[in-house]
Every structure is written in structure tokens, then in C-alpha cells.
Image (spheres, grey):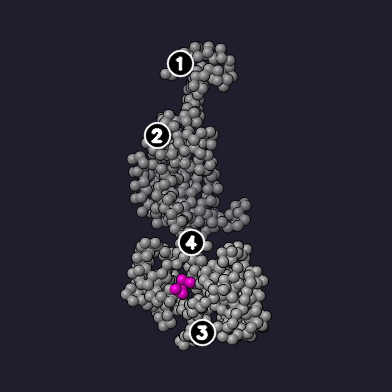
Amino acid sequence: MKPIGVVSFGEIDGMVLKAIAAHILGYLRIDTEIFSPLEYPGYAYDPRRLQYDAGAILKAFESLPVQSYAKVIGVLDADLFVPILTYVFGEARQGGKCAVVSLYRLKNNPDGSKASSPLFLERAAKVALHELGHLLNLTHCEDERCLMHFSGGIRDLDTAPPYFCRYCSVYLHDGLASL
Amino acid sequence: MSKKITIMIVDDEQIVRESFLHWFERLGYRVEMAASGLEALEKLRQFGFDLLFVDIKMPGMNGIELLGKVKEEYPGTIVVIITAYGSIDTAVEAMKKGAADYLLKPFKPEQLSLVMEKVLSQKKLITEYEYLKGRLDKISRFENIIGQSKAMQKIFNLIQEVAQSDSSVLIVGETGTGKELVAKAVHAKSRRAQHPFIAINCGALPDSLLESELFGYQKGAFTGATHPCKGFLEIVSGGTLFLDEIGETSPKMQVDLLRVLQEKKITRLGDRSLIDVDFRLISATRRDLEEEIQKGNFREDFFYRIHVITIAVPSLRDRKDDIPLLVEHFIEKYSHETTKKVDQVSRDALALLQDYDWPGNVRELENAIERAVVLSKTRTLGKEDFSFLCSPIIRTAGSRSLREMEKTHIENVLDECDWNVTRAAGILKVNRVSLHKMIKRYGLQRPL
């Protein structure tokens, strides 16, 4: 099976990519590779919203030659949006090839304080695993004790476990088997 | 993993439609998209949708116009309005026109989740309402009163007419004819249908108990009245009170009820304060009340109060045309309840059921079918499954001599055994020779 690729858009803390790769390997038992950073997506900036369009980044990302990877997760520092939502932690198409993860809103706690480094890394890994779930065709799960349960805010993300419920695990392995 | 609710996004901006599409795909919903109000209506006509997200500002037919049309033609479809900042007034107007909620673009991810939760619970309520309404319709469509005969068609028409008024109704008919079902149908068709229907059998309760049940009591009104209790006349508030066997009430109770009907006020036992009551009275009896008045057992003034309208329910022997239909209905009912695969009745058994007099009317027929279904070992109920109905012992024993009874009984047993003398002798617990002698003595002959 081809490995899962993990890459940053522009420069980010290397620990984040390592944490994401370790979580994917640890929870899904799939080889993961971190490869050279991609260009920062300045083209996706929307001056009216002062944010980056996740859809535009995803579109450009999916057109890149990344055939040596089964799926690719791109990580960036920018605040992402989709037209109907004020922000998103990450974006991926169901069954798609690429996903993007934003670190922008993971750095602070709901009360405004700065999140500790381990908590920040755990959040990044959870978002990456959740988006990878969508790439493997998993939909949002109704079980609150599942990583595929929808997280509307940082509180939800912190209460979500870093693993999948047994039903989603079955679908996940089906998805992996079809790669 | 697609979920059952069907969603359509109506927005002229492709980027918004796709954004919604990706969102709902990730939630496991199947989503359709429309770029205009007209396209949305066309898709609604073709497929029908449970939930629509509609943008207010669209060229041509705007969101409010589309909302109006959807609510007019598809009232069960839930509409959530999508609007931008600055058009709150329009959103308020949309809510007044029946939108379930509105979302201000762009919205926080958790807001969409909350709206979906709200919409899903609303959808559940609509589904439950439709289900309950269907059940109510089923009851009020007279489906519980089976009958195609002219006599029953007249009753159905009368129920429709009577239900519109608020006058007291007296239902007369033999026991087992379905008087309570008629009362329930009048209630279900009336403006009081949303309120309680309370049925009391006056003949089953002693006078003192009936009084406390109807009027209620205060604490200490009598021994055992440890707490105040509302009577049915209060509980029925706004609904229909059905007094079965009204002919069995005592003269005192008749006076008390007459006062309630005149004044629409009651006092609880052991209390003097007046309580307003609002109910419609439907009474039923199998007695001839006019005859009872002549005998002095029933008050004339009370009689005129309760029989403003009279519905006379025909006996089953007066509507024998309905027997096949009733038989079919009860077979279906009891084969379902007992999970036995009985689905029809033989021609000769049906002829037997149509010949029988049914002194206990529909109730007796129902019991007969239930008994036959429970005991039957085949899918078709035959004449032998209703042998208990043929027994002349039950019907005419009182006027027959022992010799006549013996003759009839031997004849019946021989018929049941298809004139197999050995089997019949076994049932009658006599030897074959004795049975042959009896057949000869009574001049019995096998039917041709």
C-alpha cells in the first residue's frame, strides 16, 4: 500500500507534522511520509473575509502530482473558511485524495489563553485523522465518543477522543483495504 | 450510510451550493441542488424533499416567493432560509411565512448543526403527527364500524350530521350492536374530538359509586375519601361523556344528571361550591325507555333531555348483508392477533353464519370468529368450526322434552361425524348396536 503523505504549506513547526504522522501510524497502522513544504497559498486569500478559501486550496492541492501517496494531508497556519461557514478546522472531499488542516484556531483555548504544546499537537493530530477519515469515505458519526463526530468548536474537539468508534473502524478498514 | 431525510439546496451561487453539498455529504445525507426557485419547484414535483435550504436573494423567483409556494403545495416540507447580514427583516418575514429557521451567511459550523438538530426533531414531530392523524382518520372513517348495508349507510350519514351539532344523543339498539362505537364515531367527527371521550357503564356501578365517579368528592365526604377527587364530569371538560345503559340509572341519579344538563354546573360530594362543566352527553340503552316511563321507572323530563337526537342501531339479523364483510374483518383481526394462518371461511360455513339469528349481534359474531380461529387447524374455517352455534340445546332447550332433546342431539352428532356410526357411537359413549336402535326408534335418516 502506498504511504500517506503529510506536508506543510509554507513553514510550520516540524513537530506538528511529526505528531500527525505518528498518530496516523499509531492508530491506523499505515506508513506515513513527511515531504518537502509546498508554497504558501497566497492565491486563496480573501481580503473581504481576511481568511483563506479552503475550497480553492483543496482544488489547487488536488491538481499537484502526488501519485506516490495514497492520500495527502496538507497543514498550514492560515485561518480557513468555506463560503457558508465562518471557519473550518480542516477540509476534505468525501473519498477525495487531499485534505487540508488549519492550525490557526488550535493554538488558543476557548477562554483565550494559549494552549499547551501537547494539547495543541493533539488537536492538530485529531483534525488530521478526522479529515483522513473523510478521505477514506467516512461520514460524520453520531457517537460522541468517536473521532468522526462533528466538532463545531474547540471545546468539542478537546472532548473528542483521538480514535474511531468500532463502527467507523470497520468502515475505515474497508476504506483502507480499497486503496 | 446515507440518511433517510432528503435535502435540497436552493441558491444561485454555485460556490455556496457546493459548500453545502460537501458539508452534508460529510454528514452522510443525500443532497440535491437547484440554482433557482423554478428549478427547485420542478425538482420538488419530481422527487419531493424533506428539507430545503433556500437563499433569500435569487434572480427571478426570490426565496420568500419560493417559500410561499412550497408551504402552499408541500406543507410537510421544512424550509430553512439562508440570508446575508443586513436582510434580517426579510428573514423575520420568512419566519412568519412558515420558515423553520434562518441562517445568517456565513455561519459558525455549530450553528448549522443546531439547526439540523432542530429540523430533525421538527420532522419527527411532523411524522408522529401524520401517523396519529392517520390513526384518528381511520377511526373516524367508520372503519371500526363495518357495514355496507343500506341500514348502516344511513347510520353513517346520521353520525356525520349529528356530529356537527352539540345536542344530546340517545343511541338505542340491542346488546352487542356497537352502540359505543357509534358514540365514539360521533365524538371523533365532532368539534370536541381533541378533548376526552369518557365512557361509563351505568349498569355496572352501584348508585353511590356512580355518583362519586361522576361528580367527584371532597376530602372527608364519606369514609375512605382521604383526598379530593375530580369526577368524570369535570375530567371530560370539553369532551364527550358516554353513559351506557342509561336505563339502569336510579331516579335520584336521573334527577342529578338532569340538573347538570340544565345548569352545566356541578358540586362535588361533600362540597357546596359550584364548578362549571362543559361536555356533550351521549347515552345508550337497550331498553325501551318510553315503556319504562309508562312503568314509572324512568323520568320523562330526563328522557326528553337526553334524546334530542336518537340513533337506532340495527340488529345484526336486520343487516345480514353485512355478515360476509364482518366475517372477513374479524378473521383478519384474529388471525393477526393469534398469528394463526386462517384467511377464509368456506361457503357452507358462511351460509350457516348468515342463517343464524345472532341474538348477541356483532359482539356474538366476533366472539364466534375468535373462537373458531383459535381452535381451527386449517386455513379455511368450515361449518364444523361453528358447530357450537348450531346446537339447538343452547337455543331451544327450555321448551323441549328429554326425548326430543335426545333425538336432536343424536342427529347433530351423526351430522358432525358425516353419519359414520362407529365415530358417532364413540362420541355418544354408546355401542354401535344401541346407536342403530336409537336411529331406528327416532326415524332418523341420513340427509341426501
Real-space Cα distance between discs 3 and 1?
Answer: 108 Å
- Residue linked to disc 3: A41
- Residue linked to disc 4: B4
Can residue B259 be seen here? The reply is: no
Residue at left 50%, top 86%?
A: A42
Q: Is residue B153 left or right of residue A65?
A: left
Q: Is residue A22 left or right of residue B426?
A: right
Q: Position of residue B357 (x, y in %)?
A: 42, 31
Amino acid type of the residue that numbered disc 1 sits on in the rendered structure? Gln
Amino acid type of the residue that numbered disc 2 sits on in the rendered structure? Arg
Between label 4 and label 1, give the one nearer the viewer.
4
- Residue linked to disc 1: B445
Badge 3 and badge 4 both on one subunit:
no
Q: Secondary structure at mark 4?
A: loop
- Residue linked to disc 2: B317
Dots 4, 1 in contact, CB < 8 A: no
